[in-house]
Image (spheres, rainbow, N blue to C red):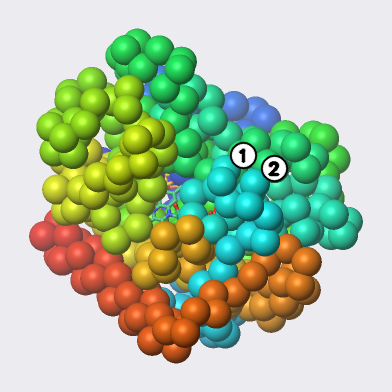
Amino acid sequence: MKQFQDLVEEVQKPGLCRLCGGCVNFCTAINYGALAFDRTGTPYLKDRDKCIECGLCYAICPETSELDTELKINFKWTPPMGNYIKILAARSKDPKIRNLATDGGVVTSLLLFLLDRGFIDGAIVSRQKDSLERKPYLAASKQEILESAGFYMDHSQGMQEFSSKYSTYSSSIEELSPMMQKGFRRVAFVGLPCQINTVRKMEALGIVPTDAIKYYLGLFCSGTLVFGEKEKRILQEMGNFYWDELKKINIKEDFMLHLQNGQTRHIPLNNLDFMKKYACFFCDDYSAEFADISFGGLGAKEGWTTVVTRTTKGRNTYLESQNEFLEEYQGTDRKEHLEQIVDKCRTYSKHKKQQAKSMRQNLGKT
Ligand SMILES: Cc1cc2nc3c(=O)[nH]c(=O)nc-3n(C[C@H](O)[C@H](O)[C@H](O)COP(=O)(O)OP(=O)(O)OC[C@H]3O[C@@H](n4cnc5c(N)ncnc54)[C@H](O)[C@@H]3O)c2cc1C
Ligand code: SF4
Ligand code: SF4
Ligand code: SF4
């Protein structure tokens, strides 16, 4: 049975670790200190004698193909973007939420609906820590869910002190332990495709605390961007703006920088490969294929969220929340707009798979 040393050889050494934290957080011997994170957030075997060689860390790693077949069968997976029931464009009915949100505020509105109806005790989201950095967070009230909406930057908190690296990645899996400690039994998990994949693998193995995760809400992802001083300078030149003019960032077809004067700068994502996490070039899931519902901005008009309902639970949740919390795009071009969204979702998913395949071939991996 493969175990952590195999993750080191097959995943870490070739640079494919996505730093999702799953192996450390759910190591069977975590309480005995077998695995730990080093200063860069990379997992390492802290005490070989404590490892009981159970193989769990290897099985749940999103970079290994263990359990892939089970997940695909469980979720009726089909190429190129997994199973889905419906793809649509929607937004929150509440203009205040739309104003806070990344796109149409659908994720935030759905979480508020689930909390309001007592379907969840809380949600694992991501919250602004400072500047560009987000931090995983277990939100348990309406206010906390609202405060976690969006992808905002706080330019008032001294952007000039931007000396260390910042990342768009938020290690949400770490919040599963506090969730258990606080006794939460019904939680919604918001995560990127790799995080949804890890937690679904744990669920397939029946590992506690996934029994408490009742809703899997996935975000589209073309890659994690890592910022430092150098990258910041290059971005300013590319987008012809000054950092302190920034109001909000977003990722859709391209990287969007919304300025305080109402203008938006667009930078093609290909131009940002220099700041993309290396492991992300090998990731083949664009649209969170194993979520109950996936969300992105791709294809949707400004201020709307692309919503992909995948499981029966996901579809029912969307439908139940619709009347009071959400509105669906109903413009006169609705039919063409939806066709365009579906087409883009499929195309971007295919492209990500092709890129991952060719990167793997270059590494001699299939
Ligand atoms: C790193 C990253 C990359 C993305 N890349 C793309 C892309 O390439 N194409 C695309 O179409 N869409 C992408 N998205 C999704 C898009 O930015 C929106 O999150 C999505 O459209 C939902 O918008 P909304 O207004 O409905 O969400 P909101 O109502 O604003 O809610 C967003 C929710 O996501 C949570 N969240 C924010 N950041 C993170 C994070 N890093 N990890 C986990 N949870 C988080 C928030 O706490 C909040 O609960 C990406 C999102 C992230 C976080
Ligand atoms: S105890 Fe199991 S999960 Fe932990 S490091 Fe060893 S093989 Fe991996
Ligand atoms: S489980 Fe996550 S953190 Fe651990 S080796 Fe795999 S990708 Fe890296
Ligand atoms: S591309 Fe996105 S989903 Fe894939 S490994 Fe990177 S952060 Fe995770």
Q: Give the quarter of the figure containing the C terminus.
A: bottom left
Numbered mark located on residue 266 in the image: none
Residue 86, image quadrant: bottom right
Residue 324, can we see it? yes
User: In this rendering, would 71 be left or right of 139?
Assistant: left
83 relative to 297, above or below: below
Residue 205, can we see it? no
Residue 160, image quadrant: top left
User: In the rendered image, which residue does mark 2 sit on?
Assistant: 145
Q: Name the spot of residue 251 as percent of width and height, x first.
A: 35, 51
Q: How many marks?
A: 2
User: In this rendering, would 236 be left or right of 325?
Assistant: left
Q: Residue at x 11, y 60 (%)?
A: 362
Q: Nearer the viewer, residue 31 or 139?
A: 139
Q: Residue at x 39, y 77 (%)?
A: 341
User: In the rendered image, which residue does mark 1 sit on?
Assistant: 148
Mark 1 neighbour class, 10 Å CA radius: few under 14, some 14 to 19, many 20 or more: many
Q: Name the spot of residue 18 as percent of width and height, x first.
A: 38, 45
Is the CB of mark 2 within 8 Å of ligand 1? yes
- Dot 2 lies on which element? helix
Amino acid type assigned to the residue bearing label 2 in the image: Ile
Mark 2 neighbour class, 10 Å CA radius: few under 14, some 14 to 19, many 20 or more: many
Q: Name the spot of residue 183 as percent of width and height, x first.
A: 85, 40
Q: Are marks 2 and 1 in contact (CB under 8 Å)?
A: yes
239 relative to 228, above or below: below
Residue 138, image quadrant: top right
- Dot 1 lies on which element? loop
Q: CA distance from mark 2 to mark 1?
A: 5 Å
Amino acid type assigned to the residue bearing label 1 in the image: Ser
Is the CB of mark 1 within 8 Å of ligand 1? yes
Q: Residue at x 57, y 85 (%)?
A: 85
